[in-house]
Image (cartoon, rainbow, N blue to C red):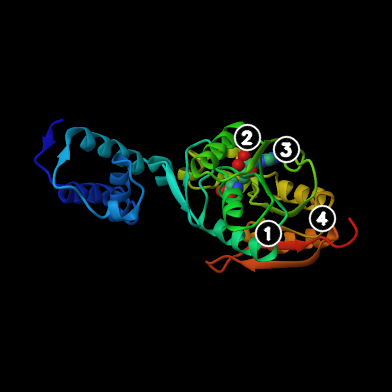
Amino acid sequence: MAELALSGQQLLDQVASELAAGGIARPRQVARELWGTVRGQTNVASLLDPPATVSEDDYAQLMALTARVVGGEPLAYVTGWTGFRHLVVRTDRRALIPRPETEGLVELALAKVRHGVAADIGTGTGAIALALASEGAFDRVVGVDVSPEALALAQENGDRLHIAVEWLLGDLLAPLAGPVDLLVSNPPYLTDREYAELDASVRDYEPRLALPSGEDGLAATRRLLDAGRQVVQQGGWIALEVDCRRATATAALAEGFGWREVSVQDDPFGRARYVLARRGTTP
Ligand SMILES: C[S@@+](CC[C@H](N)C(=O)[O-])C[C@H]1O[C@@H](n2cnc3c(N)ncnc32)[C@H](O)[C@@H]1O
């Protein structure tokens, strides 16, 4: 394979300046991640160690990936992976890219329940379900999605990480066979209008099914809080990610449906992002 008269460091400098010129934030780090993708590496140490020489093939691949990022494609789709808690999760256009704030939902949910049965509704890449299964001590973890494409990706992630999750296709709680101790969901929660106003890098690449939820953004959330009363065991918990503009409205909905110990909690960026509630003794 032909080598170029270019060191790895010179190549990364060139890519970083192309990314910077394209308005990409953290261009050096992104350049390293793209290089790691070309080399099939996702561990940080390897990304910090550019090679002495670069082959023509690697150069061409790196330039193609760089053009995709500059063209507006989310980095996690270009590299094909993202970090979620302690896991490396494969990502592609079949499912929404897991966001850092969703890691906080897992943290709060695990602080309430670590045993019994947990379900992640609208699992996408499977990130929440996989984190619950690997960090908790559950007998069973179930991941549900209405998108067969997303569910296939979730299953691939589970197989690759050797984490046992039961993947079920269907509408919200319908596929669940029995009661659960913990119901976690990061459902679609934008209004149709908010969806239309999203940044093109989200709207043009991530699945529509993952984002808007009716005129008020609460259609899926409302259904989870309503039907969840029949699915969550007495004393069990529901933990929802919400849009910060509708956290208070979601908490009021939960109280209206008879959930107890309803609380709104902030994400690590200080935005009201999670609603947690407990099932009382009557449905
Ligand atoms: C905001 S994404 C969350 C994905 C993943 N849980 C995460 O946090 O990265 C919402 C997910 O819900 C799924 N979804 C949308 N409507 C659904 C429904 N009626 N029943 C089950 N899943 C649904 C979408 O396909 C998408 O994967």
Residue shown at 72% from the left, 42% from the top = 172
Q: Which residue is mark 1?
A: 246
Query: Decide: marks 2, 1 in contact (CB < 8 A)?
Result: no
Query: Decide: marks 2, 4 in contact (CB < 8 A)?
Result: no
Q: For label 1, count other residues whose C-alpha is less than 10 Å away and answer few (under 14), some (14-19) or many (20+).
A: some
The amino acid type of the residue labelled 2 equals Ser
- Element on which disc 1 rests: helix
Residue 218 location (% of width, % of height):
71, 50
Residue pushed farthest left? Answer: 5
Residue 152 in which image quadrant:
top right
Query: Could you tell me how far apart the alpha carbons at marks 2 and 4 are, in whole angstroms?
Result: 27 Å
- Element on which disc 3 rests: loop
**Mark 3 CB lies closer than 8 A to ligand 1:** yes
Q: Which circle marks residue 233 in the picture?
A: 4
Query: Could you tell me how far apart the alpha carbons at marks 2 and 1 are, in whole angstroms?
Result: 25 Å
Query: Could you tell me how far apart the alpha carbons at marks 4 and 3 are, in whole angstroms?
Result: 20 Å
Residue 102 in view (yes/no): yes
Residue 35 location (% of width, % of height):
28, 45
Which comes sooner in the sequence, label 4 or label 3?
Answer: 3
Query: Decide: marks 4, 3 in contact (CB < 8 A)?
Result: no
Residue shown at 43% from the left, 41% from the top = 77
Q: Which residue is mark 2?
A: 147
For residue 275, side relative to residue 41 (left or right):
right
**Mark 2 CB lies closer than 8 A to ligand 1:** yes
Residue shown at 68% from the left, 56% from the top = 240
Q: Work out whether residue 147 or residue 243 is closer to the camera in this orientation and state it.
A: 147
